Amino acid sequence: MMKRLQKLGKALMLPVAVLPICGILMGLGYALAPGAMGVPDAAQEGIRYIVGFFLIKAGGAIIDNMAILFAIGVGVGLAKDNDGTAGVSALVSWLMITNLLSTGVVSTIAPAMCQPDTTNWVAFSKIANPFIGILAGLIGALCYNKFKDTRLPDVLAFFSGKRSVAIVTGVVSILVSVVLLFAWPVIFGVLVAIGNAIKGLDVIGVGIYTFLNRLLIPTGLHHALNNVFWFDTIGIGDLSAYWFPTGQAAMNAADAVNGWSVGMYMAGFFPCMMFGIPGAALAMIKNAKSTKRKYAIGIVGSAALCAFICGVTEPFEFAFMFLAFPLYVVYSLLYGIFAAVTVALGFRAGFMFSAGATDLLFSASLPAAAKTWLILPIGIIALIVFFLVFDFAIKKWDLKTPGREDEDAEGELKIELANDDYTAMAKIILEGLGGKENIAEADHCITRLRMEVKDNLKVDEKKIKSSGISGIIRPSKTAVQVIVGPKVQFVFDELKKML
């Protein structure tokens, strides 16, 4: 199970790598155009506002469609040969599921299940989420791997092979949509009920809510809890109340709901996103293999910067949640603890986008803000605690966070090939593997060709080594790993042409 999660995590690396730019663009945009965030009395015209608004929309184009990126990334990443057909099929699945389960369609085919202003209506309005994106990617990849070699009768020959994949994917997606039609609102409703149950627990409830909010990020179901606490699903509306221009409506609303202090369901995210994530990122970089430290800095370093500036946390979270899920549970628990402590100390702040420095800067002057200066002492403690906990957990459990993957030996990244004729190398390697008829599956990682052969007796190791590669590993009877080094992509590309 853990290996499958890690494989899914690697498949998500491509779309995750795109996310940091959206965080930087939106952070700069909101800094230039706070009026676009809804800051009272902020200018909504002029060249500065236009530039800021432009950057916000550019970044938003990515973050708002993150689920689609996940669908395509998972589809291609989990396909046996990383073929783009799987990505197209994943997109087909995404489009069908999100359309069939949209509020417009569901209210037409099953009006009783989707009445306006009900929990079910909210559930189906949130169907376009990362969980559905990942699910669509899995459907696209599985259908591709299973049906890419399908042969149909001559009259239907045009739809044979890879052309059949999208068709099968469509059928499977319809069946999945039927299941989700009944399952999705139940799951969503359960989480709303949990939200109702914890709203009266004061700071303990804040901690529980924040923990569940982070824990549910991979599924997209955190939207259910957010609707309870941030919006007016049960009469709280923490987010909208905080940003009310005069603050009077916010105070009146808080008085009407026992135990609610405006901003308490947002404040606890600030120290974790602005300081906790950078602390955790430092621990990951510290524990990365020396040959992969630059890689780790690129992944989690840029993600930490995004989290600090504008609270875009997905680049960081998706970079390790599937590679080291136990650590993600610990991460969510730290959020819950710090949220409870932050609120108990009286810190109050709010956001329109997320809990980064940009939102804190513009929300600190509003009437509901309180003790915002505490962000520095609490934040520094959060940075230290997140660093120490992550550092301990990574070493104690040997977790495969970015830069610690064990698929390659460290020395393999320093290999210099004796031969730069990649076509000739691929030809010799293929002959040594018994020819293309003997290849069952071909793939590659950072430094190795990963091959599955049909008959291991046909593998000639001496022949393969004569190509100029560094070495060969035989993990099983049918698995052959050819150690090429960091230029493996070029050899694989030539090999793929021959196959």
Image (cartoon, rainbow, N blue to C red):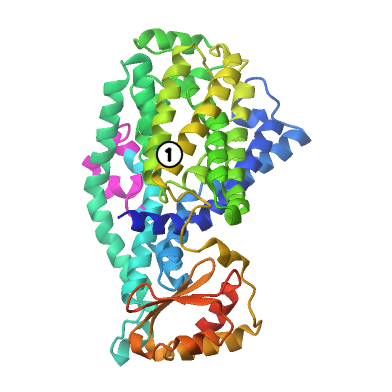
- Which of the pair 377/467 is nearer the observer? 467
User: In which quadrant of the rendered image does the N terminus lie?
Assistant: bottom left
Give the image quarter of residue 29.
top right
Rendering coords of residue 9 (x, y %): 43, 54
Whether residue 471 is visible: yes
Tell me: residue 190, above or below residue 238.
below
Q: Is residue 126 visible?
A: no
Judge left or right: residue 91 versus residue 446: left
The percent coordinates of residue 73 (x first, y second) are 47, 60
Does dot 1 land on a helix, a strand or a loop? helix
Which of these two is toward me, 324 or 89?
324
Q: Identify the image quadrant of residue 157.
A: bottom left
Q: 263 above or below 331?
A: above
- Residue at 21% of width from left, 40% of height from top? 112
The residue labelled by disc 1 is: 393
Asked whether, in this view, residue 200 is left or right of residue 441, the answer is left
Q: Quadrant of residue 410?
A: bottom right
